[in-house]
Image (cartoon, rainbow, N blue to C red):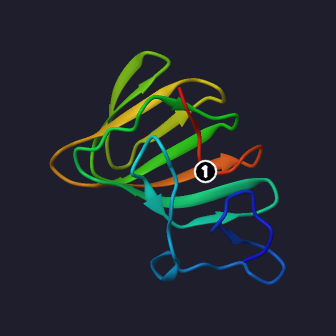
Amino acid sequence: MGDTKTEGAYKAGDGDYVFNVEELEGLMAGPGYAETFGPVIEGELTQVGVMTLPAGQTSAPHYHANEQWVYVLEGDLEATVDGQKSNVGPGQILFFPANVVHTVTVSKEGDCRFFTCKDLRTGIAGTPA
């Protein structure tokens, strides 16, 4: 692992271009506000992760200086972004603008697994609101 904004993240580039997600060690991506866990990979301008938030879990309201995209792979969640609620499921993409408070609640039926991408103004974790 090279120099990254997120402790425990993998650094892409310089010969490392392909990553097998199932073989990577994960990290807690929402310390203090969510039980989100999974591997994170950082390039020069963006960071990505394949995260899991357990069934029935709610992230506390939080925000971050970087934009975030979430593509839901498995499970269902209710997202609240700037006070607007939406149900989001597999195949849907969710956008969190920079510095906008948001939260998600995962269905009690099963975990939510998602691919996420953020710019690298800061690391993967946000700030509790």
Q: Left or right: where does residue 83 sit relative to residue 116?
A: left
Residue 103 in picture, x, y percent from top left: 42, 31
Q: What residue lies at 53% left-to-right and 80% top-to-bottom?
A: 20
123 with respect to 105 (left or right): right
Q: Residue reaching furthest front?
A: 32
Q: Residues within 10 Å of mark 1 (few under 14, many from 20)?
A: many
Under circle 1, the secondary element is strand
Residue that carries the numbered disc 1 in the rendered image: 117
Q: Is residue 61 left or right of residue 89?
A: right
Q: Count how many numbered circles sit on residues in the image.
A: 1
The quadrant of the picture occupied by the N terminus is bottom right
Q: Position of residue 76 (x, y in %)?
A: 27, 44
Q: Look at 52% across and 54% down and name the residue there.
A: 29
User: Splitting the image into 4 quarters, where does residue 56 fall?
Assistant: top left
- The residue most toward the left is 109
Looking at the image, residue 8 sits to the left or right of residue 37; the answer is right
- Residue 23: percent from the left, percent from the top? 49, 83
**Residue at point 50% right, 69% down?**
26
Amino acid, disc 1: Cys
Vertical placement of residue 40 versus 126, above or below: below
Tell me what residue is drawn at x 35 percent, y 26 percent.
Answer: 86
